[in-house]
Structures are given as C-alpha cells and as structure tokens.
Image (cartoon, grey):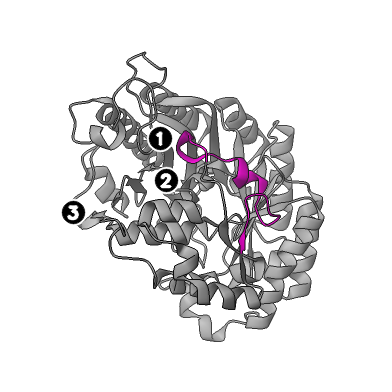
Amino acid sequence: MLLYIHVPFCRAKCRYCAFYSRPLESEAALGTWARALDADLRAWGEALKNAGTDMAPLFFADGTDGTYGRHGVRSATPGSGDLRPRVTSIFFGGGTPSLLSPALLGRLLDRAAREFSLSDDVEISMEANPESMTPEKAAGFRAAGVSRVSLGVQALDDALLSAVGRVHSRAQALAAFEGLRRAGFDSVGLDFIWGLPGESPASWHAQLEEAASLQPEHLSCYGLTLEEGTPLFEERRGLSLPGEDEQAAMYADCGEILEKHGFQQYEISNFARPGFECRHNLGYWLGEDYLGLGPSAVSSMQGERWAQPADLAAWLAAPRGQRPGPELCESLSFREQAEELVMLRLRTARGLPLEEYRRFTGRDFAADNAALIAALEAEGLAAVTGEEDGTASRALASFSPHGRPEACGPRFALTRAGMLVSNAVIEQCFESIPDAPASA
C-alpha cells in the first residue's frame, strides 16, 4: 500500500495551481494540522489492522498468514500475527511540505512507522520548494528519514518564474539543489513546467541542458495546463503562450535531450536515471492501493475511492480514521476499473499488458482495437511490442506491482509522439471496453 500525506500550506498560491492549498498564516495552524494528521495515522492504522472493522475485508482477503491479499497488503512477518498494513512508499505532497520543520516531519514518520508495517526499502519522498529548503532543513529532513526529494524548480529563468507567480528565484533553486546534495541526498528530482507564458522552444532547450548538467536522478517535465479557476485561466486570452507546433517541439526536445544525458522516459512526463524512478508514482500507474491523508487527499482501495474534504476547517472537524460521507465516496464499476487500467498503463513507456487486460475483461484488446492499432502504428503513434522490445522502460520491466510479477507477453504502448496525443488515443480505446467481463 502507498501512503500519501497532503500538506495544505504554501507561502503563496502559484498562478497556475488548482491543487488545494492555503497560505500558511502561523506556526499554530501548522501545529493544528499536524496533530490532526497524527490522530489520523493512529486511527487509520488501528482501523486497518483490526479484523473486526468494515475495512478489514479490503486488506486481509487471505487471512493473517503474511501472504499477499488481492491488492498486495500483507502482515509484517509471515505467521507473526502482525496485522498492520504493509506500506512501501510514503509521499509528502502539497502544498509545500518543506514548510514543515524536520522535527515535525520526523514525528509524523515515527507515528507512521508505529501504526503501519514499513517495508525494509520503503521510499520516503517529499516535495519541496526552493525558498523553504535551506541547507539546515535539507540536513534535518535527511536525518529524519526522507530518502527522496522532488524540488519544484519549474523554470531556471526569473522572468518565467515571475510570470506564473513562483516566489523563488533561479539562484534559490540552484542553491536548494546544492544544499540537498551537501545533505547527502542521492535521489533528487527536479520538477519543471514547459509551455509557460513567454517561453520559446529555444529557451526551453537551454533550460533542459542546464537541468541535465546538474545531474539530478529524476526530472519531471509537465506541460502547462490552464485549470479553470486559476488566475492564468482567467487571463488566458491575453497570455503569450507557445503555439501547438511549438509545444509539440518542446515535448519532443525534452525526450531527446534527456535521453542524450542518460535519462530514460518511463512515463508521459517523467524521466529518470535507471533505478531512480519515483516508486510512489509508479504504484499509482500500476494500480496499487493507496491511502491519502490530509485535506483533499484521495484514497483508492479495491474499487472503492474517496476524497477528504478540500477545506482545512472541514477536514479538521471530520472524524479521524474514517471515510467521509457518501458525497465524497464512489464505488468504481467494472467498466470504470477497466478504463483506469487502460488509461494508467498507457501513461507509462511500457504500456498496457495485453494478457492483464484479457484476464480482467475477458476480451482481446488487440483484436477489439485492430483498426485503431493499425492506424496508430502507421502514424508512428503506437505499437504492439514484445516483452523485451526497446520501448519498454527497464524500470517498469523490473517493477512488480502488488508484490507479484507483472504479466508477461505483448503490450500495447504509445510512442513519444503518441504520448503527446494520449488523451485522444485513450478515449478511442475506451470505446471497445465491455460493460461487464466477457465471461460473465
């Protein structure tokens, strides 16, 4: 199981951001959030390990003998009777988790370790913003147990940063990265956004080259999305944004430059040096169960999904360790689960395992989509590949979701050009998905 902790505070709201966050008004507000989060960790840990609760069947489908259930949560030691759910990744997202003190984050990690069974190689990640990541904090977070940091650089150009409301400078971003290195972090990711107002393919190319020269282990490069309700969305008609052809060139440039520098693309927007892929996000894309704590955080377990209230006051007032009311919960139908299987796997470089699709739906994906696949292959947008074909990322090839080996055999995968139009391709794939398993 994956554990996500949402830190809902920022110094200031970025002009493109649609995630739930609010300005940090005082240390007292942070302390109130942390106490509620600590109580949530205790309550959820108890709920999930108590065989008498309604949640138990979601996790301990095959008893307490330490073997994996249907979705991979198991007791800590075979035969030990330890019913704590097994957690393979903890991710502090936001908002701005680096606004926490290392001592406070460490106390929350200690609570998680008491309430859940952390795997020996658990990945503990946090997002950070340059203006709040001092050398002292970097050393403190490393001592507290954080093993991986995603640094929200977004651009290495002060004019671009100002245009989207970032409160840090290029110099602060470079200093924060250096501070993480000096603190001993050997898994650091840099997050960028391409297609910003006023950005050109040439300036994006230069930033990529500079970012790669810093030698991080991971790079996330997201295209700017104008989300309704954000300042940039309201101002969209007056923005000087790159055109469609320029954006396509930026995306292609990203892959070519980063691969030249030793990075592998393993997902639409993510590149890593071999062995440094973000295992938390891989878990999402490969269908792991996850528990989300904090305002607006989402959980998904065995076809059940729920969201915490996207409001700090409402979240603080809610009962701890419980799913929210029915308005924030949903049971995914068979078709919705099949659509998610297709959508999430086609985000990855390795693509959709055709045998896994057949097992879940009872249908032959390649046969049902023969005309679509032929058209996409002719345009260089997709391919049906073998297990060892070069389009498969080594990270995904070795990753075993739910503690079990992945399905072997052919896969349907998008090329980099196909990833650029992935939404349209996925929508067409949805048309062939049955409403019920073919064997039903």
Q: Tag 3: residue type?
A: Pro
Mark 1 vs mark 3: which is more N-terminal?
1
For label 1, the SS is: loop
Q: Tag 2: residue type?
A: His
| Rendered image quadrant of residue 197 | bottom right
> Picture coordinates of residue 253 (x, y %)?
74, 68
Q: Residue furthest bottom?
A: 237
Does any portion of residue 22 appear in the rendered image?
Answer: no
Q: Which residues are magenta?
A: 384-405
Disc 1: which residue: 72
Mark 1 vs mark 2: which is more N-terminal?
2
Disc 3: which residue: 326
For label 3, the SS is: helix
Q: Is residue 150 left or right of residue 158?
A: left
Task: Find residue 6 and name its label.
Answer: 2
The foreground one among 50 and 145 is 50
Q: Are marks 1 and 2 in contact (CB under 8 Å)?
A: no
Mark 2 vs mark 3: which is more N-terminal?
2
Q: CA distance from mark 2 to mark 3?
A: 21 Å
Residue 387 drawn in magenta: yes
> Picture coordinates of residue 15 (x, y %)?
51, 67
Camera-side mark, 1 or 2: 1
Q: Tag 1: residue type?
A: Gly
User: Crowdedness of circle 3 by 10 Å Cα count: few (<14), some, many (20+)?
Assistant: few
Q: Residue at x 74, y 74 (%)?
A: 201
> Picture coordinates of residue 131 (x, y %)?
62, 49
Q: Residue at x 42, y 17 (%)?
A: 77
The foreground one among 101 and 346 is 346
User: Crowdedness of circle 2 by 10 Å Cα count: few (<14), some, many (20+)?
Assistant: many
Residue 432 drawn in magenta: no
Q: Are marks 1 and 3 in contact (CB under 8 Å)?
A: no
